Amino acid sequence: MNPFQFTRVTTPKAAITAITKENGTYFLAGGTNLIDLMKREVIIPERLVDINKLPLATIEKTATGLRIGAMAKNSTVADHELVKKHFPLLSQALNAGASAQLRNMATVGGNMMQRTRCPYFYDNSMPCNKRSPVQAGPDKGQANGPTGCGAIGGINRMHAIFGTSTKCIAVHPSDMCIALVALDATVNVSGPKGDRQIPFSDFHRLPGDMPQKDNTLQPGELIMSVDLPTNRFSDNSHYLKVRDRASYAFALISVGVAIDMKRGTIQDVRLAMGGVAHKPWRLTAAEAFLKGKPATEANFKQAAALAMQGAKGYGENDFKLTLAPNSIVDALKTAAKTA
Amino acid sequence: MNQHEHTGGESASADSSRRSFLKQSSALAALVLTPPTAMAAADQGLDEKMAAAFEQMPLQVNVNGTAHRLSIEPRVTLLDLLREQLHLTGTKKGCDHGQCGACTVHVDGARVNACLTLAMTTEGSTVTTIEGLADGGPTGALHPMQAAFIKHDGFQCGYCTPGQIMSAVACIREGHANSPDEVREYMSGNICRCGAYANIVDAIMDVKKGGAKV
């Protein structure tokens, strides 16, 4: 690992000041992704600002729902009584991710900030626009290895089928974020220009011409917490993760479903997919279709067909065009308890 | 556990074992492999930057009941600190990327991958390694989980075993060992290339059912 400066901070204000002071500074939370990327020299920070001592790990009830501190560990959130009772989708999604050891280390904020696991991004000898943007510079990322996209026309079994660009077809790897986008979470951030709220669906972005930017955070901003609004989904939630082995693998396809059911009718529903796009992929057309309809397999299939509009395969990942709608139907059936 | 101060760094060892030879030769290798940034800084006469590149920072951490006051480079992982500076080589380096679990230790009671933990982030923490698991230390009676791994033949080559055992103890303490299926799920962060999984699950279930204090 390359040498770097190390600063420990104990207040959010000091953290924000420290990260805005010089280029090449990164926040260090659980480190499960960042330290790995540093070992592989995909990211070479000049300075790390250790935010593990920040008092941001609280999980508390609010007037409108639940507030989860950005530094709360993934395992703590997954096992929290209020989360299990009122937001079981989040608990299930968290437990579907990584391993018990990594969930003990990884934080909510860090999980949101993790980078894609596209093998081209991880290999400095391979072309990658995310790792090595065409024009490197401040705010445009760090040139490191050749530019281009090795995955387009390359090994792309794990890659995106929605919202891709000619620059990047990588997917966001998080399970937790699929649950958070489905549950209409809001992200509270603090930065040099003050505090602001970001709807979770706007936190991550599509690659477009700037695949080096995973999210819409502004320079110097720190994730403080995530807010979850109260819902009526706790009886009919399911997180389905389809992967190459039974545990401890990234999703080929994942589906988060949360239904408000009354006597077999879908009053309201939330649907999101992982493993298909550069950001957690909310299925709004399918949600609109299902609202007010009976929870039948025929309706689930129609919803899945609507969700798949605009999907595009890149060769090795063409199987996702079939696996995804099948997974949506399967997850809906399980959540609705009609399976 | 007994608490006594121990100042870290290179401890003088009389025997010229294979391990101390390796240690010395890797120190020489480290001089040859001076970080490029430091070399560049030296070339340009940037003494301050060069000093920064080799900067040592203070760290206080309790490992297996011993309080250590150390001076380390910020880039040192907990795994390398344990193995290279504190000579606790029971914790193994497998993949070094958080994928195999061979480096599993407990930090403040939680199982973590030591290879992805910067040692600096353990300031003020209590670390337990396989050497500190049994009440009597490495020379005392085996911890019930260690004994169960032997009883059930839960290993072949043994390289993943310290990590498996540390993970298994945490799995029970967390309350995630209520069925073989649950054990398999919550032990998935520990890879065994020899494929001793079935016996590892048996060992964990045996300890869980036996009700021994882990």
Image: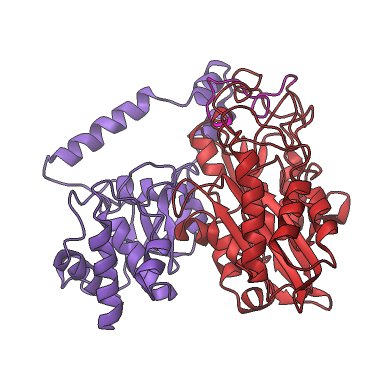
Chain colours: A red, B purple
* Residue A70 visible in rendering: no
Rendered location of residue A114, percent (x, y): 62, 46
Q: Main secondary structure of the magenta part?
A: loop
Rendered view: A254 above or below A83: above
Hey, which quadrant is residue A101 in on the image?
bottom left
Which residue is at the far front?
Answer: A298
- Identify the residue at image location x=66%, y=36%: A160
Number of marks in the rendered image:
0
**Which residue sits at x=29%, y=65%?**
B201
Which residue is more in the foreground, B11 or B118?
A: B118
Residue B46 location, quadrant: top right
Q: Nearer the viewer, residue B129 or B75?
A: B129
Task: Tell me if B148 is positioned left or right of A317 in this view.
Answer: left
Location of residue B210 with respect to A152 vertically, above or below = below
Please name whichever residue, A81 or A155, is drawn nearer the observer in this view of the structure: A155
Name the quadrant of the N terminus of chain B.
Answer: bottom left
Q: Does B151 appear in magenta?
A: no
Residue B70 place in picture, x, y as percent: 41, 53
- Asked where in the image residue B60 lies, by quadrant, the reply is bottom left
Q: Relative to A266, is A318 on the left or the right?
A: left
Name the quarter where the C terminus of chain B is drawn. Answer: bottom left
The location of residue B200, given as percent across then percent down, is 26, 62
Work out whether residue A121 or residue A2 is closer to the camera in this orientation and state it. Answer: A121
Residue B164 against residue A159 in the figure, above or below: below
Query: Residue at the spot x=55%, y=21% of the render?
Result: A126
Residue B2 seen in render: yes
Q: Which residues are magenta?
A: A121-135
Q: Is residue A134 magenta?
A: yes
Q: Please state the horizontal and vertical placement of residue B10, each as a whole percent of the image.
A: 28, 46
Q: Is residue A248 left or right of residue B131?
A: right
